[in-house]
Image (tube, helix red, strand yellow):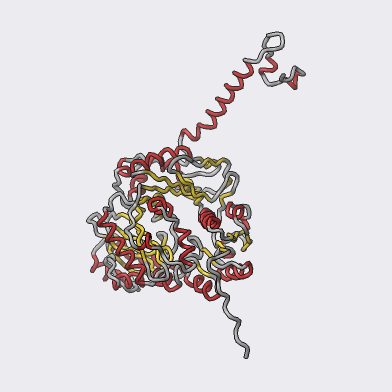
């Protein structure tokens, strides 16, 4: 009986990376690879044939048709492609396969490096019930609640009675606000339990739910961690992510306006303990709810690079994607990261820009980007995945770009953000830029008085308008046309005929039709 062929071993340092994603995160990884002198390859679906990542990559490979299940989620096909093109590693970005433990293990088994954490860490943190149990054992503060599934309405009622209303019914495999219900009284419990289970089954293929105590008006504060395979884990400080809509973050900043050095140290220690408890490697984020009392509670761990990672990069000076690659190559974190407490320098704020229509409940607004203007100038960064003329597809997440600013302090950063938002244009699709411009002028936001429900409360109360375009933006084409007309009139009236008399045919731009004189 012949021996099985030896498993292919990836080269270190990497010579070629395959990016298994699309949009701005694919662009971000390709740029980091190019700076390291690494060949960057990318997969793409049929609608993304002319996308920005395809145009920027050294190699681009068609992986399937429009549906993600037939393209970006085809794990085995992506690994087969990596082997065929000689890629040493796969970077999953975020979303799609980034937190798929089976895919991470398949990469390792095939001899292709997975630029992310071990499969075991992904699996442990992928179950909220399991992660709660592990965090409690590691001494990380956890929201009061159950550590086992709720199996019936009667079971839910008994546990809710112990915790006291309000409570949260949560999907164990959940994320993105799915399988999540707030319950204020026993009368609401039955429908909330059934609704959460049904949504969890449809979204995650797992209808397991549990109960935990509802924390009134908490802030969402998360800690960025880096961990190498040599046992070193560090916290890079916190991000404030309380400005959310339907449990989805839309504005993030670093540092948090309310986290002082002592609280940062305690939250950082808890985040490091959380990562160490599951043998974590690479970049990850430990998310906490921060109560008004100053208590904080473990929410979940995102075992991947976060959308909002740029704000941490700007206040620490570290390139997180570059370190993701280095850690996956086996390099240890250096003393300048592990032996010193990372303190934020200045303040950074990120705004996510989606193709969405605020006037239609923030529904996706796919279409062609007819005009694109990205802000520039001091302290402004654009992580953009589209270009003027590209199409925003109906098949994928409609985020087009992330606008990030950095200033010497929060006030300075807000000044730069206000200026940058005023310069930004995405014509052809609807956006919430008008809403963002109003929000950053809101007194509660400017004073840092926020919690995870602030944005939705202000919209519902009519304190913030949700125009897809401001009045000024709608009127701008008319204003431009009027100015151009006046300028043409001024030019034509200043041009005399050869004998000094005005030529009215020329002024009316009818020279050719009337057989008149041409311009000299």
Q: Nearer the viewer, residue 207 or 70?
A: 70
**Residue 346: x %, y % from top left:** 35, 47
Taking the spot 57% from the left edge, 46% from the top edge, the residue there is 387
The answer to which of 240 and 214 lies nearer the viewer is 240
- The count of marks equals 0
In front of the other: 320 or 75: 320
| Percent of width and height locating residue 425 | 51, 40
Residue 415 coordinates in the image, percent (x, y): 38, 39
Residue 122 vertical placement versus 453 (above, below): below
Question: Residue 149 in the image: x percent, y percent?
Answer: 34, 73
Relative side of 392 to 290, left or right: right
Q: Compared to 144, does 28 lie above or below?
A: above
Give residue 173's quadrant in the image.
Answer: bottom left
Can the viewer see residue 22 in this picture? Answer: no
- Residue 309 lies, with reference to residue 126, above or below; the image says above
Q: Farthest residue in the front direction?
A: 335
Evaluate whether residue 433 shows in this view.
yes
Residue placed furthest toward the right: 515
> In this image, 6 relative to 132: left or right?
right
- Residue drawn at x 69%, y 13% as measured from the top left: 503
For the N terminus, which image quadrant?
A: bottom right
């Amino acid at each position: 009986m012949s021996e099985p062929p030896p498993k292919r071993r990836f080269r270190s340092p990497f010579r070629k990376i395959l990016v298994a994603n699309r949009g701005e995160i694919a662009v971000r990884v390709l740029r980091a690879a190019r700076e390291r002198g690494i060949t960057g390859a990318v997969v793409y679906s049929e609608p993304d044939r002319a996308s920005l990542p395809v145009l920027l990559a050294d190699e681009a490979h068609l992986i399937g048709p429009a549906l993600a299940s037939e393209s970006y989620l085809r794990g085995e096909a992506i690994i087969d492609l990596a082997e065929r093109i000689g890629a040493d590693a796969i970077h999953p970005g975020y979303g799609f396969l980034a937190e798929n433990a089976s895919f991470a293990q398949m990469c390792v088994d095939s001899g292709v490096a997975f630029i992310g954490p071990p499969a075991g860490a992904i699996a442990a943190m992928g179950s909220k019930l399991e992660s709660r149990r592990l965090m409690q054992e590691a001494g990380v503060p956890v929201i009061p609640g159950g550590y086992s599934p709720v199996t019936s309405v009667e079971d839910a009622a008994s546990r809710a009675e112990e915790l006291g209303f309000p409570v949260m019914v949560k999907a164990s495999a959940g994320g993105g606000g799915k399988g999540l219900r707030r319950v204020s009284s026993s009368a609401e419990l039955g429908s909330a339990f059934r609704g959460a289970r049904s949504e969890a089954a449809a979204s995650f293929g797992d209808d397991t739910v549990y109960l935990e105590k509802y924390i009134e008006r908490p802030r969402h504060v998360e800690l960025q961690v880096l961990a190498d395979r040599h046992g070193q884990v560090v916290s890079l400080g916190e991000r404030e992510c309380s400005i959310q809509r339907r449990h989805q973050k839309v504005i993030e900043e670093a540092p948090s306006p309310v986290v002082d050095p002592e609280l940062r140290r305690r939250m950082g220690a808890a985040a490091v303990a959380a990562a160490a408890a599951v043998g974590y490697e690479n970049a990850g984020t430990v998310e906490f709810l921060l109560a008004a009392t100053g208590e904080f509670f473990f929410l979940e761990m995102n075992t991947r690079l976060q959308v909002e990672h740029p704000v941490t990069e700007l206040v620490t000076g570290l390139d997180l994607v570059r370190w993701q690659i280095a850690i996956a190559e086996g390099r240890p974190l250096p003393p300048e990261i592990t032996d010193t407490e990372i303190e934020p320098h200045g303040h950074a704020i990120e705004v996510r820009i989606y193709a969405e229509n605020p006037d239609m409940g923030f529904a996706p607004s796919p279409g062609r980007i007819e005009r694109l203007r990205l802000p520039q100038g001091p302290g402004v960064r654009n992580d953009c995945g589209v270009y003027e003329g590209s199409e925003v597809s109906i098949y994928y997440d409609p985020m087009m770009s992330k606008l990030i600013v950095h200033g010497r302090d929060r006030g300075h950063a807000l000044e730069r953000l206000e200026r940058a938002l005023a310069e930004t244009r995405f014509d052809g699709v609807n956006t919430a830029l008008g809403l963002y411009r109003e929000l950053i002028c809101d007194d509660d936001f400017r004073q840092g008085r926020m919690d995870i429900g602030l944005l939705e409360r202000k919209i519902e109360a009519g304190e913030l308008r949700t125009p897809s375009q401001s009045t000024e933006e709608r009127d701008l084409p008319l204003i431009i046309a009027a100015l151009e007309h006046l300028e043409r009139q001024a030019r034509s009236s200043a041009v005399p005929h050869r004998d000094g008399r005005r030529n009215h045919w020329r002024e009316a731009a009818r020279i050719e039709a009337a057989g008149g004189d041409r311009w000299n």
